[in-house]
Image: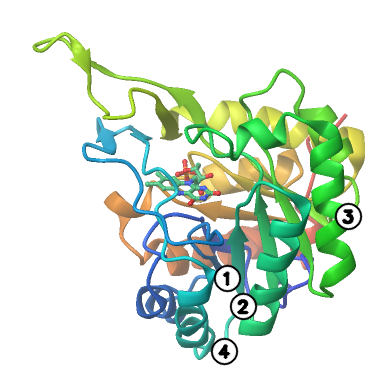
Amino acid sequence: MKLKPDIGIGAANPFILASGILDANGYTIKRILENGAGAAVTKSIGSEERKGFDPPVIYSDGRSVINAIGLSNPGIENYGQEIKIATSSGKPVIGSIFGQTPEEFAMLAEKMQAYGASAVELNLSCPHVKGYGTEIGSDPELVSAIVSAVKSRINIPVYAKLSPNTSDMLGQAIAAGKADGYVLINTIKAMKIDINTGKAVLSNIYGGLSGKSIKPVGIRYVYEVKKETGKTIIGVGGINNFEDALEYIMAGASAVQIGSAISQAGIGIFANLTKELESYMEANSIDNIEELVGVAIE
Ligand SMILES: Cc1cc2nc3c(=O)[nH]c(=O)nc-3n(C[C@H](O)[C@H](O)[C@H](O)COP(=O)(O)O)c2cc1C
């Protein structure tokens, strides 16, 4: 039985740790990989250390999360050690990077490759930091220039993580067409008001919504982008159990990432999902996970 996803990084199963969750530190990433994740994406790393926004930076109602962490990260020069620790697990680590120009992205990608990352994920989609993420992802010419610059400088796979916060995700995907695949979706711009104080809960006012409530949006984007481009897709958004993951795979995802669910399910979720996938494939006489990818597409 083949559980290995065709995403070019040698992951043993299709269940990947999403960017930004328990992944600023190499030892935590290593622990998650050793406990069954097929691969792990790092926190998004930029050129310089960033403190991020003042607290409160996260709101959760048990079903969904709104975060405005503000791309806090130690900076690329300080992150090599964490990748080395994480990759000592022998499992693939995907380096997530963010920047403002094609040159900056290309420099960050080169460093990630040199540190031992198996692939690079371009964060073109953070919804809450001015001058980064969605603001870049909404400019098709810039997206295209960033992907070309990164592709010309590294030889590991490049995945473009796109935003649901623009009117035209398909346009974004086409602009990022030189990438080896897409990661869909990042969080959806949202906010929460505390009715006792009459004020926004997050210091940044706006944040990004993740967790159970965004799954139908993610499914729709994976389906649409897979149907229109045929390219490799890694699905992410609201996956809490095996049924959610299977839905993404049937919509067209070759692999999936899990983020918010980990706070409730714990890091055992990756091994559990793999066991359930094995049982499902056995019960339905499926030899290769690829047979399931995109079966819902008409
Ligand atoms: C606290 C938090 C921090 C995040 N940080 C990042 C980040 O640094 N880079 C990124 O590309 N996505 C980041 N994300 C988005 C997740 O990787 C993922 O796309 C999103 O949460 C949807 O998946 P989920 O519903 O399984 O959490 C973050 C999400 C959360 C909840």
Marks 3 and 1 close (CB-CB < 8 Å): no
Q: Three-letter amino acid code at disc 2?
A: Pro
Q: Secondary structure at mark 2?
A: loop
Marks 1 and 2 close (CB-CB < 8 Å): yes
Estimate the x, y position of residue 251 in percent, counting from the top left.
Answer: 73, 38
Image side of residue 275 versus residue 191, left or right = right
- Label 3 – label 2 distance at C-alpha: 23 Å
Marks 4 and 1 close (CB-CB < 8 Å): no
Question: Along the polypeptide, which appears first: circle 4 or circle 1?
Answer: 1
Image side of residue 193 versus residue 166, left or right = left
Residue that numbered label 3 is attached to: 148
Query: Which residue is found at the position 79% from the left and 67% from the top?
Result: 157
- Label 4 – label 1 distance at C-alpha: 10 Å
Query: Which residue is found at the position 22% from the left and 36% from the top?
Result: 56
Q: Three-letter amino acid code at disc 4?
A: Gly
Question: Along the polypeptide, which appears first: circle 3 or circle 4?
Answer: 4
Give the vertical position of 145 relative to 273 (above or below).
above
Residue that numbered label 1 is attached to: 39
Residue that numbered label 2 is attached to: 92
